[in-house]
Image: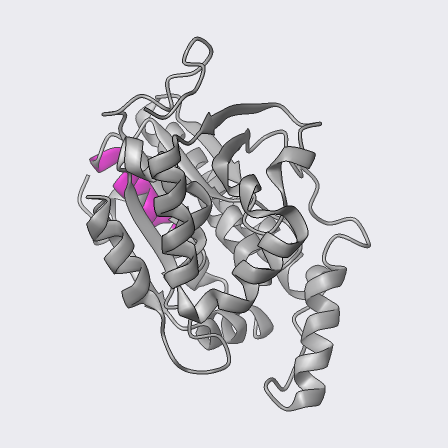
Amino acid sequence: MMKTDLSTTGIFVPGIRAALVIAHPGHELSLYGWLKLVRPRVFVLTDGSGHSSSPRIERTTNILRELSAETGSFYGRFSDATIYEMLLTHQYDLFINLARELAAQIINERFNCVVGDASEGYNPTHDVCRLVVDAAVEMAERASGLKIKNLQFLAMSNPAVELTAPHVGPICLDEATFQQKLLAARNYLELKDEIDALINEHSAESFRSEYLYEASHYNVDIFPSTACAYYEQHGEKRVKQGYYRHVIRCHEHVFPLALALRRCAKESVYEQIAGSDYDL
Protein backbone atom coordinates (compact mmCIF):
# COMPACT_ATOMS: atom_id res chain seq x y z
CA MET A 1 0.00 0.00 0.00
CA MET A 2 1.10 3.56 -0.65
CA LYS A 3 1.10 5.45 2.62
CA THR A 4 -0.10 9.00 3.15
CA ASP A 5 -2.07 11.01 5.64
CA LEU A 6 -5.58 11.40 4.25
CA SER A 7 -6.85 13.39 7.23
CA THR A 8 -6.02 16.78 5.71
CA THR A 9 -6.68 16.25 2.04
CA GLY A 10 -8.70 14.09 -0.30
CA ILE A 11 -6.46 14.45 -3.33
CA PHE A 12 -4.81 11.09 -2.72
CA VAL A 13 -8.09 9.22 -2.65
CA PRO A 14 -8.69 6.80 -5.55
CA GLY A 15 -11.61 7.91 -7.69
CA ILE A 16 -11.12 11.67 -7.29
CA ARG A 17 -11.90 13.57 -10.50
CA ALA A 18 -8.46 14.97 -11.29
CA ALA A 19 -6.45 16.28 -14.24
CA LEU A 20 -2.69 16.36 -14.66
CA VAL A 21 -1.42 19.04 -17.03
CA ILE A 22 2.28 18.91 -17.94
CA ALA A 23 4.51 20.80 -20.33
CA HIS A 24 6.59 17.86 -21.56
CA PRO A 25 6.32 14.09 -21.81
CA GLY A 26 8.26 12.59 -18.92
CA HIS A 27 7.04 14.97 -16.23
CA GLU A 28 4.51 12.33 -15.21
CA LEU A 29 7.42 10.42 -13.66
CA SER A 30 7.55 13.00 -10.86
CA LEU A 31 4.06 11.90 -9.77
CA TYR A 32 4.19 8.23 -10.76
CA GLY A 33 2.71 7.02 -7.46
CA TRP A 34 -0.07 9.62 -7.51
CA LEU A 35 -0.84 8.66 -11.11
CA LYS A 36 -1.08 5.00 -10.15
CA LEU A 37 -3.38 5.77 -7.26
CA VAL A 38 -5.67 8.45 -8.73
CA ARG A 39 -5.48 7.78 -12.50
CA PRO A 40 -6.10 11.37 -13.56
CA ARG A 41 -6.75 12.48 -17.10
CA VAL A 42 -3.40 13.60 -18.48
CA PHE A 43 -2.87 16.62 -20.72
CA VAL A 44 0.55 17.19 -22.31
CA LEU A 45 1.37 20.50 -23.96
CA THR A 46 4.25 19.40 -26.23
CA ASP A 47 5.59 16.27 -27.88
CA GLY A 48 8.95 16.71 -26.14
CA SER A 49 10.85 17.14 -29.38
CA GLY A 50 13.07 19.93 -28.07
CA HIS A 51 15.65 21.04 -30.63
CA SER A 52 16.11 17.48 -31.92
CA SER A 53 12.75 17.29 -33.75
CA SER A 54 12.34 13.75 -32.34
CA PRO A 55 9.13 13.45 -30.26
CA ARG A 56 9.18 11.30 -27.13
CA ILE A 57 5.44 11.30 -26.44
CA GLU A 58 5.11 7.56 -27.16
CA ARG A 59 7.22 6.74 -24.10
CA THR A 60 4.76 8.64 -21.91
CA THR A 61 1.83 6.96 -23.66
CA ASN A 62 3.21 3.57 -22.63
CA ILE A 63 3.55 4.67 -19.00
CA LEU A 64 0.00 5.99 -18.90
CA ARG A 65 -1.29 2.81 -20.47
CA GLU A 66 0.44 0.73 -17.81
CA LEU A 67 -1.13 2.90 -15.10
CA SER A 68 -4.59 2.97 -16.73
CA ALA A 69 -4.56 6.76 -17.00
CA GLU A 70 -6.40 8.37 -19.92
CA THR A 71 -5.30 11.32 -22.04
CA GLY A 72 -6.91 14.73 -22.33
CA SER A 73 -8.06 16.80 -25.30
CA PHE A 74 -4.53 18.05 -25.99
CA TYR A 75 -1.71 15.56 -25.79
CA GLY A 76 1.62 16.38 -27.39
CA ARG A 77 -0.20 18.78 -29.70
CA PHE A 78 2.69 21.20 -30.18
CA SER A 79 6.39 20.93 -30.85
CA ASP A 80 8.72 22.82 -28.55
CA ALA A 81 9.75 24.89 -31.57
CA THR A 82 6.15 26.03 -32.03
CA ILE A 83 5.83 27.09 -28.39
CA TYR A 84 9.10 29.02 -28.59
CA GLU A 85 8.08 30.73 -31.83
CA MET A 86 4.72 31.80 -30.40
CA LEU A 87 6.45 33.26 -27.34
CA LEU A 88 9.15 35.04 -29.32
CA THR A 89 6.60 36.63 -31.67
CA HIS A 90 4.09 37.42 -28.91
CA GLN A 91 1.38 35.31 -30.55
CA TYR A 92 -0.47 34.70 -27.33
CA ASP A 93 -3.84 33.67 -28.79
CA LEU A 94 -2.59 30.07 -28.94
CA PHE A 95 -2.13 30.02 -25.16
CA ILE A 96 -5.36 31.89 -24.44
CA ASN A 97 -7.34 29.44 -26.56
CA LEU A 98 -5.56 26.55 -24.87
CA ALA A 99 -6.58 27.90 -21.46
CA ARG A 100 -10.19 28.16 -22.63
CA GLU A 101 -10.06 24.62 -23.99
CA LEU A 102 -8.69 23.32 -20.69
CA ALA A 103 -11.34 25.26 -18.76
CA ALA A 104 -14.04 23.61 -20.88
CA GLN A 105 -12.52 20.20 -20.19
CA ILE A 106 -12.40 20.90 -16.46
CA ILE A 107 -16.10 21.70 -16.50
CA ASN A 108 -17.08 18.88 -18.88
CA GLU A 109 -15.19 16.25 -16.91
CA ARG A 110 -16.18 17.73 -13.55
CA PHE A 111 -12.60 17.83 -12.34
CA ASN A 112 -12.35 19.08 -8.78
CA CYS A 113 -8.56 18.96 -8.75
CA VAL A 114 -6.05 20.11 -11.38
CA VAL A 115 -2.33 19.41 -10.94
CA GLY A 116 0.36 20.91 -13.16
CA ASP A 117 3.98 21.93 -13.46
CA ALA A 118 5.31 24.56 -11.09
CA SER A 119 7.10 27.65 -12.34
CA GLU A 120 10.71 26.88 -11.51
CA GLY A 121 12.46 29.17 -13.97
CA TYR A 122 14.12 26.12 -15.51
CA ASN A 123 12.35 25.98 -18.86
CA PRO A 124 10.00 28.59 -20.35
CA THR A 125 7.51 25.95 -21.49
CA HIS A 126 7.18 24.67 -17.91
CA ASP A 127 6.37 28.18 -16.73
CA VAL A 128 3.96 28.73 -19.63
CA CYS A 129 2.17 25.51 -18.70
CA ARG A 130 1.67 26.84 -15.17
CA LEU A 131 0.27 30.11 -16.50
CA VAL A 132 -2.19 28.25 -18.76
CA VAL A 133 -3.34 26.03 -15.88
CA ASP A 134 -3.85 28.99 -13.54
CA ALA A 135 -5.91 30.84 -16.15
CA ALA A 136 -7.96 27.76 -17.02
CA VAL A 137 -8.80 27.02 -13.40
CA GLU A 138 -9.92 30.61 -12.83
CA MET A 139 -12.02 30.52 -16.00
CA ALA A 140 -13.63 27.24 -14.98
CA GLU A 141 -14.38 28.53 -11.50
CA ARG A 142 -15.97 31.70 -12.87
CA ALA A 143 -18.05 29.75 -15.39
CA SER A 144 -19.17 26.97 -13.05
CA GLY A 145 -19.30 28.71 -9.70
CA LEU A 146 -17.39 25.78 -8.20
CA LYS A 147 -14.11 25.77 -6.27
CA ILE A 148 -11.40 23.75 -8.02
CA LYS A 149 -8.21 22.67 -6.27
CA ASN A 150 -5.21 24.06 -8.15
CA LEU A 151 -1.96 22.26 -7.27
CA GLN A 152 1.55 22.06 -8.65
CA PHE A 153 4.62 19.87 -8.37
CA LEU A 154 8.35 20.35 -8.82
CA ALA A 155 9.72 18.62 -11.90
CA MET A 156 13.32 19.82 -11.61
CA SER A 157 13.89 20.35 -7.86
CA ASN A 158 13.99 18.11 -4.82
CA PRO A 159 10.59 18.54 -3.10
CA ALA A 160 12.02 17.44 0.23
CA VAL A 161 14.05 20.63 0.49
CA GLU A 162 11.31 22.98 -0.75
CA LEU A 163 8.94 22.64 2.19
CA THR A 164 8.81 26.30 3.25
CA ALA A 165 5.60 26.59 1.21
CA PRO A 166 2.27 25.00 2.21
CA HIS A 167 2.05 21.54 0.71
CA VAL A 168 0.05 18.36 0.78
CA GLY A 169 1.61 14.95 1.14
CA PRO A 170 3.93 13.38 0.95
CA ILE A 171 2.59 10.32 -0.66
CA CYS A 172 5.21 7.76 0.33
CA LEU A 173 5.49 4.96 -2.19
CA ASP A 174 5.48 1.34 -1.09
CA GLU A 175 8.50 -0.68 -2.19
CA ALA A 176 6.81 -2.23 -5.23
CA THR A 177 5.58 1.12 -6.57
CA PHE A 178 8.93 2.75 -5.77
CA GLN A 179 10.77 0.13 -7.82
CA GLN A 180 8.24 0.48 -10.66
CA LYS A 181 8.83 4.23 -10.66
CA LEU A 182 12.61 3.85 -10.74
CA LEU A 183 12.35 1.32 -13.57
CA ALA A 184 10.05 3.58 -15.57
CA ALA A 185 12.44 6.50 -15.06
CA ARG A 186 15.51 4.53 -16.08
CA ASN A 187 13.71 3.09 -19.11
CA TYR A 188 12.83 6.61 -20.30
CA LEU A 189 15.92 6.67 -22.50
CA GLU A 190 15.24 10.12 -23.95
CA LEU A 191 15.58 11.56 -20.42
CA LYS A 192 18.56 9.50 -19.31
CA ASP A 193 20.85 12.48 -18.69
CA GLU A 194 18.19 14.36 -16.71
CA ILE A 195 17.24 11.31 -14.64
CA ASP A 196 20.88 10.49 -13.89
CA ALA A 197 21.52 14.09 -12.86
CA LEU A 198 18.56 14.12 -10.48
CA ILE A 199 19.60 10.81 -8.92
CA ASN A 200 23.20 11.95 -8.54
CA GLU A 201 22.14 15.23 -6.96
CA HIS A 202 19.29 14.07 -4.73
CA SER A 203 19.69 10.24 -4.57
CA ALA A 204 17.29 7.62 -5.87
CA GLU A 205 15.56 7.58 -2.49
CA SER A 206 14.24 11.08 -3.13
CA PHE A 207 11.96 9.52 -5.78
CA ARG A 208 10.04 7.67 -3.04
CA SER A 209 8.08 10.69 -1.75
CA GLU A 210 5.80 12.88 -3.85
CA TYR A 211 4.58 16.34 -2.86
CA LEU A 212 1.98 18.72 -4.20
CA TYR A 213 1.93 22.46 -3.52
CA GLU A 214 -0.90 24.95 -3.50
CA ALA A 215 -0.51 26.94 -6.72
CA SER A 216 -1.34 30.15 -4.90
CA HIS A 217 1.54 29.73 -2.46
CA TYR A 218 4.60 28.26 -4.14
CA ASN A 219 6.54 30.66 -6.41
CA VAL A 220 3.69 33.14 -6.38
CA ASP A 221 5.85 35.81 -7.99
CA ILE A 222 7.75 34.09 -10.80
CA PHE A 223 9.13 37.30 -12.26
CA PRO A 224 11.85 38.70 -9.99
CA SER A 225 15.01 39.70 -11.82
CA THR A 226 16.74 36.36 -11.20
CA ALA A 227 13.72 34.02 -11.53
CA CYS A 228 14.36 32.91 -15.10
CA ALA A 229 18.13 33.28 -15.16
CA TYR A 230 18.67 29.59 -15.81
CA TYR A 231 16.63 29.22 -18.97
CA GLU A 232 17.85 32.56 -20.30
CA GLN A 233 21.47 31.50 -19.81
CA HIS A 234 20.72 28.09 -21.29
CA GLY A 235 19.04 29.78 -24.25
CA GLU A 236 22.09 31.94 -24.81
CA LYS A 237 24.22 28.79 -25.01
CA ARG A 238 21.80 27.19 -27.46
CA VAL A 239 21.91 30.27 -29.68
CA LYS A 240 25.71 30.14 -29.73
CA GLN A 241 25.52 26.43 -30.58
CA GLY A 242 23.22 27.20 -33.49
CA TYR A 243 20.13 25.38 -32.18
CA TYR A 244 18.06 28.57 -31.80
CA ARG A 245 18.10 32.02 -33.38
CA HIS A 246 16.82 33.98 -30.39
CA VAL A 247 16.70 33.74 -26.61
CA ILE A 248 13.36 33.63 -24.79
CA ARG A 249 13.45 36.32 -22.11
CA CYS A 250 11.32 36.27 -19.00
CA HIS A 251 10.34 39.94 -18.94
CA GLU A 252 10.20 40.34 -22.70
CA HIS A 253 8.24 37.21 -23.65
CA VAL A 254 6.81 35.29 -20.68
CA PHE A 255 5.70 38.14 -18.42
CA PRO A 256 3.50 39.73 -21.13
CA LEU A 257 1.86 36.33 -21.65
CA ALA A 258 1.16 36.12 -17.92
CA LEU A 259 -0.56 39.50 -18.06
CA ALA A 260 -2.58 38.53 -21.14
CA LEU A 261 -3.76 35.27 -19.56
CA ARG A 262 -4.62 36.91 -16.25
CA ARG A 263 -6.59 39.62 -18.03
CA CYS A 264 -8.42 37.05 -20.13
CA ALA A 265 -9.21 34.89 -17.10
CA LYS A 266 -10.67 37.80 -15.18
CA GLU A 267 -12.70 38.98 -18.16
CA SER A 268 -13.83 35.52 -19.25
CA VAL A 269 -17.50 34.67 -19.28
CA TYR A 270 -19.33 31.41 -19.75
CA GLU A 271 -20.07 32.16 -23.40
CA GLN A 272 -16.38 32.55 -24.24
CA ILE A 273 -15.58 29.12 -22.88
CA ALA A 274 -18.70 27.52 -24.33
CA GLY A 275 -17.83 29.09 -27.67
CA SER A 276 -14.80 26.88 -28.04
CA ASP A 277 -14.87 23.60 -29.93
CA TYR A 278 -15.34 21.74 -26.66
CA ASP A 279 -19.01 21.71 -25.73
CA LEU A 280 -19.97 22.32 -22.13
User: Which residue is at the far bottom?
Assistant: 242
**Quarter of the image holding residue 63?**
bottom left
In the rendered image of this protein, does residue 60 appear above or below residue 190? above
Give the residue at x 41% y 39%: 178
Q: Nearer the viewer, residue 19 or 258?
A: 19
| Snapshot colouring | one colour
Query: Does residue 6 appear left or right of residue 245 in this picture?
Result: left
Whether residue 106 appears in magenta in the rendering, the answer is yes
Query: Do we see residue 272 in this rendering?
Result: no
**Quarter of the image holding residue 11?**
top left
Q: Which residues are magenta?
A: 99-108
Give the residue at x 63% y 86%: 245
Quadrant placement of the N terminus:
top left
Give the residue at x 39% y 63%: 188
Image location of residue 96, percent across then percent down: 43, 54
Q: Nearer the viewer, residue 11 or 29?
A: 29
In the rendered image of this protein, does residue 60 appear above or below residue 109? below
Query: Does residue 133 appear left or right of residue 164 in this picture?
Result: left
Give the residue at x 30% y 47%: 42
Image location of residue 106, percent across then percent down: 30, 37
Query: Does residue 272 appear left or right of residue 260 in this picture?
Result: left
Whether residue 37 appears in magenta in the rendering, the answer is no
Query: Do we see residue 191 in this rendering?
Result: yes
Q: Nearer the viewer, residue 62 or 257?
A: 62
In the rendered image of this protein, does residue 30 appear above or below residue 10? below
Counting labels gives 0
Image location of residue 103, percent across then percent down: 34, 41
User: Which residue is at the far top?
Assistant: 7
Quadrant placement of the C terminus:
top left
The prevailing secondary structure element of the residues shown in magenta is helix
Image location of residue 277, percent across then percent down: 21, 54
